[in-house]
Amino acid sequence: MEMNNKYVDILPEVENALIENIPIVALESTIISHGMPYPKNLEVSRRCEEIVRTYGAVPAVTAIVDGRIKVGVTSEELERLAKSKDVLKVSRRDIPTALANGSDGATTVAAAIMIADMVGIRVFATGGIGGVHRNVEDTWDISADLQELERANVCVVCAGVKSILDIGKTLEYLETIGVQVMAYQTQEFPAFYSVESGYQANYMATSADDVARIFKIKMDMGIDGGILVGNPVQREYAMEKAIVDSAIEQAISEANVKGVTGREITPYLLSRILSLTDGQSLNSNTQLVWNNCKVAAQIAVSLTGITQEKEIRQYLARMPKP
Ligand code: PSU
Ligand code: MN
């Protein structure tokens, strides 16, 4: 997808990395503004950036600040996204509205990978992605994250999906839209807080190089769309299934009673699970996000080694300089 840079600010470090073919990992910001409480969210996202750097890539948090799309944020902007109560949750549909109104917006996975694809960033890390909700028959609630994976040429590293969602239906949906789902160094697609979900991934990726070489072939062939890598939480930080399940059941039934729906439901469930597990889930959430940043950076490094990324240079050449 082409983009008009009239609306986009690429941080100089990220722009330089694009020009020089230096590995980059895009990161979302809904997890910062709506997924974790302050100040833990700031601490976690700063560490995400550090980890990406440690493994040889440049981090690029995507967000909207004062109605401008940011690819890479400054330290001050990150702090504002973490602290402010006035940050919209922005998915694909919300981007033009947020820009028109000069809003601050935190990007979901959908918005983040759409933006990454526009500028030519090929690897992205998060905690968990959205998916098909459990009561989809009644609500038709399917996260826009899935459809964006059909379009954006981005490798998405996550720890699977939370069982607030219907994991089986989420995987079926991804199959229907042609998204390759890999489990990283394991057979099963992970379930965020737990290593096992009971569902096999379509492919077991043996290494970052393995993911990168497959992604490169997909790009060489012009097959649009992302690939999804499920990187399980480290066993020592996984949560006991019974504890997670009961917190999730309770959170979902509370949401039903309160009539929480639409864009509010995911943040509502995430924050309820957090308090119902006494913050225990926050620690596991934190660790798995960091682990995903590491693997994403390794994939980005591997991919950069085998790609020319001509299209990135073409994109930058198109951009009118002010
Ligand atoms: N699931 C999680 N943690 C998260 C999210 C989902 O386990 O932080 C966030 C991500 O930003 C994701 C978004 O893109 O919620 C999905 O929201 P929705 O279900 O409204 O599409
Ligand atoms: Mn939804």
Image: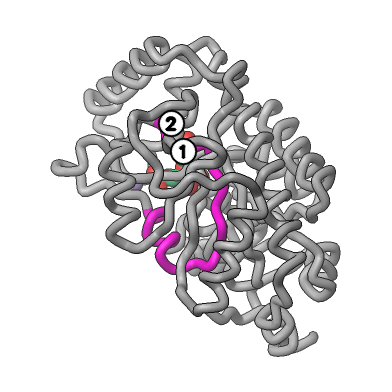
Q: Residues within 10 Å of mark 1 (few under 14, many from 20)?
A: many
Query: Of the numbered discs in the image, which one, if any, rests on residue 160?
Result: 1
At 56% from the left and 28% from the top, the residue drawn is 233
Give the secondary structure at mark 1.
loop
Contact flag, marks 1 and 2 (Cβ < 8 Å) = yes
- Tell me the residue at 70%/82% (across/down): 310
Residue 282 seen from this side: yes
Tell me the amino acid under the disc marked 1. Gly
Specify the color scheme.
one colour
Question: Does 89 sit left or right of 140 as displayed?
Answer: right
* Vertical position of residue 260 compared to residue 181: above or below: above
The answer to which quarter of the image holds residue 117 is bottom right
Could you say where residue 260 lies in the image, as x and y percent from the top left? 30, 34
In the picture shown, does residue 242 fall above or below 61?
above
**In the image, is residue 12 above or below residue 266?**
below
Instruction: Give the amino acid type for the residue marked by disc 2 in the picture.
Output: Ala
Queried whether the magenta region covers residue 89, the answer comes back as no
Q: On screen, 285 above or below 300? A: above
- For label 2, the residue is 191
**Magenta stretch bounds:** 144-162
Disc 1 to disc 2, C-alpha distance: 5 Å
